[in-house]
Image: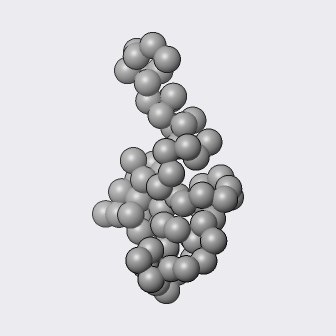
């Protein structure tokens, strides 16, 4: 689960403590993705991709943990 407010994993927007939304593309506040022209920057792994990328190492790690917990072979 990735929060739509802060873009971090582990909680949803209803439980987020961040007062303002963070752009999914660049990781900065004050605007939304459709208005962003900055280079992609992931707030989770600090990589050169958006926080919503399914190739993010942190996303893949969380996905592997969830699969392990429910007993799905990798």
**Left or right position of 40 against 70:** right
Instruction: Identify the image quadrant of residue 3.
Output: bottom left
Pick the front one: 36 or 62: 36
Pick the front one: 7 or 54: 54
Query: Where in the figure is residue 24, as x and y percent of width and height?
Result: 48, 66
Query: Where in the figure is residue 16, as x and y percent of width and height?
Result: 41, 65
Above or below, comparing residue 24 to residue 74 in the picture: below
Q: Residue at x 40, y 15 (%)?
A: 71
Q: Residue at x 51, y 28 (%)?
A: 64
Above or below, comparing residue 32 to residue 13 in the picture: below
Above or below, comparing residue 15 to residue 64 in the picture: below
Q: Residue at x 65, y 52 (%)?
A: 45
Q: Residue extending furthest left?
A: 14
Query: Where in the figure is residue 49, as x and y percent of width and height?
Result: 60, 58
Q: Is residue 20 visible?
A: no
Q: Is residue 2 visible?
A: yes
Pick the front one: 40 or 8: 40
- The colour scheme used to paint the residues is one colour
Instruction: Identify the image quadrant of residue 67.
Output: top left
């Amino acid at each position: 689960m990735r929060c739509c407010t802060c873009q971090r994993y582990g909680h949803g927007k209803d439980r987020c403590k961040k007062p303002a939304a963070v752009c999914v593309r660049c990781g900065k506040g004050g605007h939304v993705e459709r208005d962003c022209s900055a280079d992609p920057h992931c707030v989770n792994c600090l990589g050169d991709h958006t926080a919503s990328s399914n190739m993010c190492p942190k996303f893949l790690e969380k996905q592997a943990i969830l699969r392990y917990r429910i007993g799905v072979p990798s």
